[in-house]
Amino acid sequence: MTRRLGAWQAYILAALFGAGAAFGQQPYDLPPLMLLGMIGAAWLFAAQKTPRQAALTGWAFGLGYFMHALQWIVSPFMVDVARHGWMAPFALVFLAAGMALFWGVAFWGARKLSRSSPWALIPCWAAAELVRAYLFTGFPWASPAQSTVSVIAGQALAWVGPHGLNAIVICVAVCAATAFTSRPRWPWRLLREGVVLATLAALLLPVPGGQAPLSGHTIRLVQPNAAQKDKWDADKIPVFFQRQLQYTAAPPEGAAPDLVLWSETAIPWNLEWAGTALQEIARAGGDTPVALGVQRSDDLRYFNAMITLDQSGAVTQTYDKHHLVPFGEYMPLGDVMARFGIYGLAANQGHGYTAGPGARLLDFGPLGRALPLICYEAVFAHDVNAASERPDFLIQITNDAWFGRGAGPRQHLAQARMRAIEQGLPLARVANTGISAMIDPQGRVTASLPLNTAGFLDAALPAPGRITAYRRKGDAPAALFVLLALAACGLHARRRGQARP
């Protein structure tokens, strides 16, 4: 059938397959559609005779996929429409087109390595996802693995990590696509069809219920629900601050909390000017320590930080975010851009925020030590693995008010769940407008506050699980598989070329 399609028809069909594959991501959460879309892309790839045709097919598939999956990216630009609204359509189109380039290059490379077989697509596509996670600070949002957190297949993250799981899903998609293009002997056909059916089952069956072992501690999650357009409004700042104080001082719902968590940039004042506010927060907490997000400065450098307070309101620990959002928290060539009135969305001081020194653990006494992640840092599996020692639990504080009311906050939560599975650790997540949640080491949400709702939640902290294979080895096994598979494909292509008359 693909042979009867014209070039543009094939590219349009590829884009439609990509848009359909995005239904695997939140808020739809239909991972079998992710696999079916990828099968369609691999099927179209098999019919492309030249690397150029293959590249355009892969790029069109990626464009349809990322345009749909990342449509929430327009939301940050609509907070201040007069200043940033004009950028919104360009941001979506350019980001989707840029992300699609990785897949276009993967399809091009696969066709260069093999002019007749689709198997080279497996390491090439997996390599593209690896590079996408690291290049230019990385942006691994909406990877195929991200769609699996609610189903049994996602538990493989603990063993092979996101890039290993990406490679598995791609391998199954290519296997399924060969059913339309080849008829191997029955033992191989039976194996192929068994693998595909088993994967579909793993993408359909939810993670079994049940309660993870508990640590015996409770964390209070405080969600003020300050819309981004109101968050820095002078008339509304006292409302949100008092709301958080009220939630912090409220009687416990069950067991008394051992820690109170506030969200990213939970107060509008720089740390250096917030002494009185910190004392009020400490009084509201009483005997319970409070941790919160705050902006701080050091000389002329600004940091997006998380601090912990003692009972007097004194700062006892500080963590500075080290993986910053380009064009959001800092601008490349920021001082030059500022001359033209172009700033990062979240900071107006030239280059914006300064990156902290790196991952570090914070000590929470009886609860153990936690690895703090501020917003975007929870997107990167390798950042969580960067801690020199294994923590007892993970903390994510974030301000997802930037991400709108639909897909963005839900996809961000899905990535937090991935980090919990990969590390075998519980994760306490506090988001300004939601979704705040407690997540167990299997990535299950054990308690949560709805999106765009003000409130607080006393959530039992699950106990840490066993150290995972991914925590021990990181991305090295997936990278090694990709390199060896690419080398094997290259050697095979060279031999075939030498064998031709």
Image: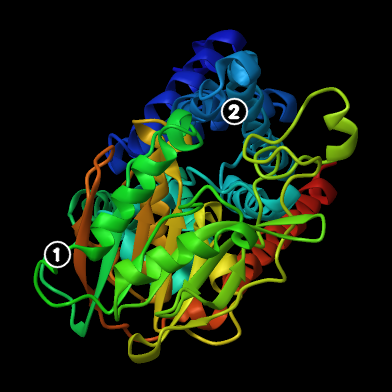
In depth, the one of 471 and 452 nearer the eye is 452
In depth, the one of 443 and 304 nearer the eye is 304
In terms of image quadrants, where is residue 97?
A: top right
Label 1 vs label 2: CA separation? 35 Å
Q: Position of residue 200 (x, y in %)?
A: 26, 48
Q: Residues within 10 Å of mark 1 (few under 14, many from 20)?
A: few
Q: Which residue is mark 1?
A: 208
Q: Quadrant of the N terminus?
A: top left
In the image, residue 160 above or below residue 130? below
User: Could you tell me which secondary element the residue under label 1 belongs to?
Assistant: loop
x 64%, y 46%: residue: 325
Q: Position of residue 92 (x, y in %)?
A: 58, 23
Q: Quadrant of the C terminus?
A: top right
x 59%, y 16%: residue: 85
Q: Position of residue 340 (x, y in %)?
A: 85, 22
Query: Which label sits on residue 96?
Result: 2
User: Three-letter amino acid code at disc 2?
Assistant: Ala
